[in-house]
Image (cartoon, coloured by chain):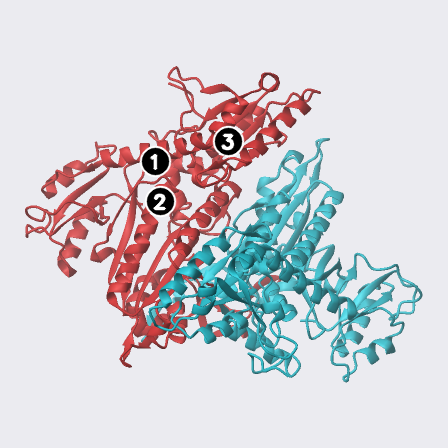
Chain colours: A cyan, B red
């Protein structure tokens, strides 16, 4: 068995492994501020790539970016009872606007208490709804299609980096439409944008489908999600799209005059993905040597590490590396110029190599005096780190050949990461469970990698649904979604015994 | 005199004109949340262009982006007395983390009071300093060069959109270095990045120089700024760069072992620009027809408005416009593909034309059936809207010729906006005032466009400086900066009578 770069393996302790990848890949760290993390350059660089690629797709589907206030007056929340019930328990509240010195300490100034407290936005439906009600008068003003990239805060008791932090970064799209059909079409269009973005850019295979009633966004008529399978078999909800009907338009008075001159409530939607996606990338693509970043979202796709000896031959090696970097930058991979870094930091070459392995740079190229003299490069592929004998797989290649093949190599790595994850997902959704005992048996303690189970159910609602949810909760299980492409339901609901109407995924989840 | 698109002119009421441009160009609006604005798509699109172009320059100078928490514990501020004195009066304070229903209203839950209140960041020196102290151990870890794009909050009593809002968007760079020289070099390098960015991208001529002691950032050893001249003659500080010495490294314990094994405090810098820059763009380039956006930062550089008649000939006009749009997108202007929009919104062509005039799209192209039949386009340049006879200057041109010339046209408009502003700046800095009475006379009521005055002074400090500042304040004047490229001082200080050591700018300011 090969020795790996991390001291904890996924097998031994998945949660500890996850924390170690984050630390060793310089993705993020605890900030000292409760529930908030510092996103370090490599982690933030991945987020910037996510932003750039997803933003292009959001704009290509006709949306424009805006920016709305961080603070939301309490009264905005009071207007929408169901929504506030869903969020009221976890919001940061600003009550004062000044500090003063008192006994040598800083304290909120009692004379600067706000008349109306402000909530730090947990999501922006209410404040954006208020803007929509100003913007929309006539059917000619519709649809309104906007998006915002922002930070939001939901006070969390137990936090885990990227997956659940009090402050996180996200995009939230908000749209208003003249008809239910159009709003539903928008909801599904953005779900598909998320699905294809996750697959194509993050190399994350996901299942897109509708959430059951108990998992709906507070105030939504329908909520859809994409769900990804982590390497411990748990599900991660990686994006949601909501059809909100007239919930927010009636609370915020978003009305328009239709073509017949009658006043109607607008139909609204909202949809979002967050820095949580990076947690998914780590838990899907990481291995016991650290992170593996899909080339499409890697801040640097090729990292060149010169093997320097503090001698006169260093100069020629560095010049050779610079030419290589420039030649790579002229290549195109996955539709963009190749992003190649020459790492000249003052550290040992071996330590740099392993640093980039842990960070998950897709390709690491080492260049020593011998490579330079022979017109070669030594290439390490992060997705195929070891040879069958357990040794690091570093391949010497003519420089020109490597440059010419860089585009295909990066595309191949993108595809191979996706393929591995797709295979794992497909192999681990069990579809033959026909009674509740089958679920209990499947998720029993001994089964280390239970994956997900897809079952037929009758789509109970209200109290009947609550009872089912409680039974699952006792097994630490949750409903994920009703896959859009699931087979038709057959037989009886495994929870209620009534005729089944659709198939739903059951899993442990983050 | 021509009739203009706005109802208020700059001449009649500059402040009202500014508000009208913002409203009519769909840049931003009041949000209903005290001191916070909604940045609308055209305004946010300009900010996105600013971000993209400036971010490229920040990265090209070796900086990496990170993200730090929105919330800063009070105790972090207590560590740095001078810094907190500068900010303590204007911060939003989070004191509770939950709401409850009480008598039908939502209120902060008394049982969810935070043990230590959290401040919404007004700037991030303290929390980033705490991270630096974790990251930096040895001289090998230096320099640390990072930047963050974020929202910050400074509670403001009187707000004005883009110029002074409680919440605003900005970037803040933070760096740590082993030596004073290197940190000072960084401070000046980023000042130059801001200067050249303002000139090249925003077409804003600016004066770069050092702020006097009384205008320094709280905790800084030296503060530098770029100052732009608005069309009412006032100055706008459009970016700052600070050499912080060891102020924050001693408060936050940022120490490193130098090459000799001794512990030293790091030398730090910080630098930032904000959405305030957009206020500057409005007040420098706007005219009585609305905004004029420099092509480098225009979300759309060319807007195509088809003249449709709801008839069968519309289809051919639209097809012709689509070809034009595609052909423009294949052209390059100012180093990027041309950004061309085909405006197909359901509105009258004339109303669209004037909408884009007010928004300040650099080039508006109108295409009617006659243009289409003749293979022509009708072109309006936003920087030269009227002919000498006062009529709108719309020029019919062969389509191919327009496409081939688009790159040069956009570069010319960028240059012409910069040229006009540069001329205005240079014509309105007066350098011949040699006594305080001269300042009083220059800024006396009758003078509608006083511009700035550059005088020789002795650089007094402490109480002596305070006295000078008070005298200026009585005239509503402030020191702007000591221009880097000012001539040497001559004669006596016009404030103190002592020998002058440098030349400093005096102006009214935003």
Residue at (34% x, 50% y) in the render: B194
Q: From where the camera sits, is residue A228 visible? A: no
Residue A286 in picture, x, y percent from top left: 61, 71
Q: Residue B175 shows which numbered tag?
A: none
Tags 2 and 1 on a common chain: yes
Q: Is residue A136 left or right of residue A342?
A: right
Which mark is first along the chain, 3 or 2? 2
Residue sitting nearer the eye, B214 or A168: A168
Residue B248 in picture, x, y percent from top left: 31, 69
Judging by the rendered image, the residue that carries numbered circle 3 is B356
Judging by the rendered image, the residue that carries numbered circle 1 is B418
Q: Quadrant of residue A152?
A: bottom right
How would you rate the neighbour count of disc 3 (Cα within 10 Å): few for under 14, some for 14-19, many for 20 or more? Answer: many
Q: Is residue B177 left or right of residue A418?
A: left
Chain name for mark 1: B
Chain name for mark 3: B
Real-space Cα distance between discs 2 and 3?
24 Å
Q: From where the camera sits, is residue B300 visible? A: yes
Tags 3 and 1 on a common chain: yes
Residue A157 in picture, x, y percent from top left: 58, 74
Judging by the rendered image, the residue that carries numbered circle 2 is B198
Element at label 2: helix
Residue B424 in picture, x, y percent from top left: 27, 33
Residue at (40% x, 73% y) in the render: A347
């Amino acid at each position: 068995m090969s020795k790996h770069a991390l001291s904890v393996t996924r097998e031994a302790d998945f949660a500890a492994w996850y924390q170690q990848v984050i630390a060793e890949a310089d993705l993020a760290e605890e900030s000292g501020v409760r529930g908030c993390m510092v996103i370090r350059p490599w982690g933030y660089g991945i987020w910037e790539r996510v932003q750039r690629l997803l933003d292009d797709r959001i704009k290509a589907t006709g949306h424009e970016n805006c920016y709305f206030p961080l603070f939301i007056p309490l009264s905005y929340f009071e207007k929408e009872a169901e929504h506030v019930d869903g969020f009221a328990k976890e919001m940061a509240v600003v009550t004062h606007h000044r500090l003063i010195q008192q006994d040598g300490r800083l304290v909120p100034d009692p004379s600067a208490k706000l008349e109306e407290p402000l909530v730090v936005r947990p999501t922006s439906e209410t404040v954006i709804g208020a803007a929509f009600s100003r913007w929309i008068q006539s059917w000619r003003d519709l649809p309104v299609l906007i998006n915002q990239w922002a930070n939001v805060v939901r006070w969390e008791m137990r936090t885990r980096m990227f997956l659940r932090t009090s402050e996180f970064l996200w995009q939230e799209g908000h749209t208003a439409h003249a008809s239910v059909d159009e709003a539903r079409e928008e909801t599904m269009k953005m779900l598909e944008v998320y699905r294809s973005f996750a697959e194509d850019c993050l190399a994350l295979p996901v299942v897109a489908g509708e959430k059951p009633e108990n998992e709906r966004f507070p105030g939504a008529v329908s909520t859809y999600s994409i769900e990804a399978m982590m390497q411990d078999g748990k599900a991660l909800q990686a994006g949601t799209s909501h059809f909100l009907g007239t919930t927010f338009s009636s609370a915020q008075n978003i009305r328009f005059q239709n073509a017949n001159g009658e006043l109607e409530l607008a139909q609204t939607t909202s949809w979002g993905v967050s820095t949580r996606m990076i947690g998914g990338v780590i838990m899907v693509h990481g291995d016991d040597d650290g992170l593996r970043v899909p080339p499409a979202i890697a801040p640097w796709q090729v990292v060149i590490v010169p093997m320097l000896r503090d001698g006169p031959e260093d100069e020629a090696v560095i010049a050779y590396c610079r030419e290589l970097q420039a030649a790579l930058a002229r290549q195109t991979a996955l539709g963009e110029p190749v992003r190649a870094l020459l790492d000249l930091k003052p550290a040992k070459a071996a330590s740099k190599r392993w640093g980039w392995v842990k960070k998950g740079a897709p390709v690491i190229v080492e260049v020593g005096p011998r490579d330079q003299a022979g017109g070669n490069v030594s290439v390490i592929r992060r997705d195929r780190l070891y040879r069958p004998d357990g040794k690091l797989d570093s391949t010497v290649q003519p420089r020109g050949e490597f440059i010419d093949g860089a585009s295909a190599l990066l595309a191949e790595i993108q595809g191979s990461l996706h393929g591995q994850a797709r295979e794992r997902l497909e192999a681990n959704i069990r579809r033959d469970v026909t009674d509740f005992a089958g679920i209990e048996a499947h998720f029993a303690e001994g089964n280390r990698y239970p994956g997900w189970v897809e079952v037929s159910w009758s789509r109970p609602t209200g109290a009947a649904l609550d009872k089912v949810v409680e039974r699952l909760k006792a097994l630490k299980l949750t409903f994920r979604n009703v896959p859009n492409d699931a087979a038709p339901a057959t037989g009886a609901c495994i929870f209620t015994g009534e005729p089944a109407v659709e198939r739903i995924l059951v899993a442990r989840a983050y």
